[in-house]
Image (cartoon, rainbow, N blue to C red):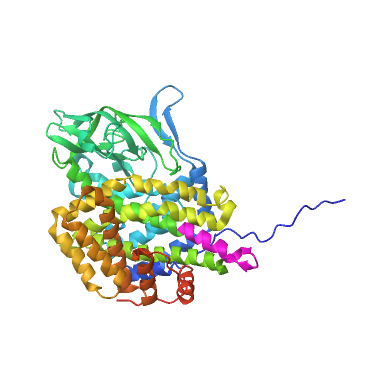
Amino acid sequence: MAWQTHTVFNQPAPLMNSNLFLSDSALREAVTREGAGWDSDLLASIGQQLGAAESLELGRLANSNPPELLRYDATGTRLDDVRFHPAWHLLMQGLCANRVHNLAWQEDARAGAFVARAARFMLHAQVEAGTLCPITMTFAATPLLQQALPKPFSDWLSPLLSDRYDPHLAPGAQKRGVLIGMGMTEKQGGSDVLINTTRAEKTADGFYHLVGHKWFFSVPQSDAHLVLAQAPEGLSCFFVPRLLPDGQRNALHLERLKDKLGNRSNASSEVEFFEACGWLVGEEGDGVRQILKMGGLTRFDCALGSHALMRRAYSVALYHALQRQAFGKNLVDQPMMRQVLGQMALRLEGQTAFLFRLARAWDSRDDAREVLWARLFTPAAKFAICKSGIPFVAEAMEVLGGIGYCEESELPRLYREMPVNSIWEGSGNIMCLDVMRVLGKHPAALELLAAECAEVKGQNRHFDRTWRQLQQLLRRPAEEQGREIARRVYMLGVGAQMLRYASPPLAEAWCRMMLDTRGGMRLDEPTLEDLLLRAMGRGRQAPQA
């Protein structure tokens, strides 16, 4: 007798072969509104490629096969090399080909290039996040190096601005493409880099010898790192190549790779410098100012990356709910589940509008007001969005139920990935202190925030009340209130964008959900339907300014 225990049914197919760009109405609108509509066709092509099953499998493979440290070869010669799975290299090749590491810094960059680059970054982040670490650091370091690259390395600019990925071990000038890493934090200091103990002594030839360590040495396979060390005049920034101009290995030893919760595809290491050769970037004692030039860019990418992970988690959850039946209905039609999915979509709508307005501010580097806009809202965005990502992905897991907690689903990897963006480049309290610093040192920042709120004053009572409450907090700001201040700055920034650009029902719903302290918000059915359709690339178009 043939035994059949059961027939498999009511099991939704996994989400694959979708277009990550065309299926996101809020993203498409934001790209056009903020000045990068010229990139929409390419973004649609990238979105189709990245949504394919083959690309998603590369993301899985890169994380299932983390990098390995090769300290010595068979003869005992010191190597300090990092070996990656082939999937890592294919993902990196795609990122560089799409210029996610340098689009905005091209000599012929179009207006809106920063916005277009942000959209490309967001699409790639939905497939695999670890590869974005070298991309982000190279992107942030490039404008600094365009101005202050040490003279012996002037021929690195061409590969730095290329669209090629070249993982071969060779001096930078001989490569088709180069990547830049960073080495800032030490065991005793973490974010407090002023107490770094790595020291730098100038040689007769003009470069410096570095002696010390870094507790986190990001992307150790990079062609060069920007490293903080104590010089005679104070904390300074140094360009430390992996290979010296004559092809010899620099005197830096990788001690181990970090065994991390997530971000498994990417290598993070500990390093020791044994009189490693470094070249001064800028002036001695100017290290903090130099890294702050990069810090805003990396922090923006942290917020953007968390948003992208949230978007992917939501897409997986919504696709499941559209197919799975429970108690006689599709999950998406169950009233409570419908509210959960609608409110998740509404949160993403606000984040998308705000982040791409922020990208436009970063794109307007010659406009003092836009520079201040980016300076104020970037740390607020990193704090609020990265912090909200962890419970958001957990909620997406609940939509799938038990299978969402199993490794066959994408969601466990997304969940493990989430905390790194809150921690890297300054954790939550550091971001809130930065928001308070901007408001305290730059009176124009408060004027800018007031102008933002004045433009939409009277459109929503919850928004207006939140602005009044923040004004009260800022009359006598206390450090222990920093999180509340940063949270309200962020909420006002997002709320202003929603009131300007979203349809009135969505804007009103967002303000009630995020700003009404009484809670208990319920989305009406027309708004729910519109949100869910927009999350799939359909639904009503928002009015454009």
The magenta segment: 312-331
Where is residue 225 drawn, in percent x and y? 28, 39
Image-based side of 176 in relation to 204, left or right: right
Image-based side of 535 in relation to 159, left or right: right
Residue extending farthest to the left is: 233
Q: For this rendering, which residue is in front, 433 or 485? A: 485
**Is residue 315 rendered magenta in the image?**
yes
**Is residue 494 rendered magenta in the image?**
no
Which quadrant of the rendered structure holds the C terminus? bottom left
Whether residue 100 is visible, yes or no, is no
Q: Is residue 18 above or below residue 482?
A: below
Q: Main secondary structure of the magenta part?
A: helix
Where is residue 429 drawn, in percent x and y? 28, 46
Which residue appears at 49% of the width and 67% of the height?
A: 339
Whether residue 440 is visible, yes or no, is yes
Image-based side of 66 in relation to 11, left or right: left
Where is residue 138 drawn, in percent x and y? 31, 48
Which residue appears at 23% of the width and 53% of the height?
A: 435
Image-based side of 495 in relation to 435, left or right: right
Q: For this rendering, which residue is in front, 121 or 540? A: 540
Q: How many marks?
A: 0
Residue extending farthest to the right is: 1
Residue extending farthest to the front is: 518
Which residue appears at 27% of the width and 49% of the height?
A: 431
Where is residue 544 drawn, in percent x and y? 33, 76
Give the quadrant of residue 388: bottom left
Q: Is residue 111 above or below residue 102?
A: below
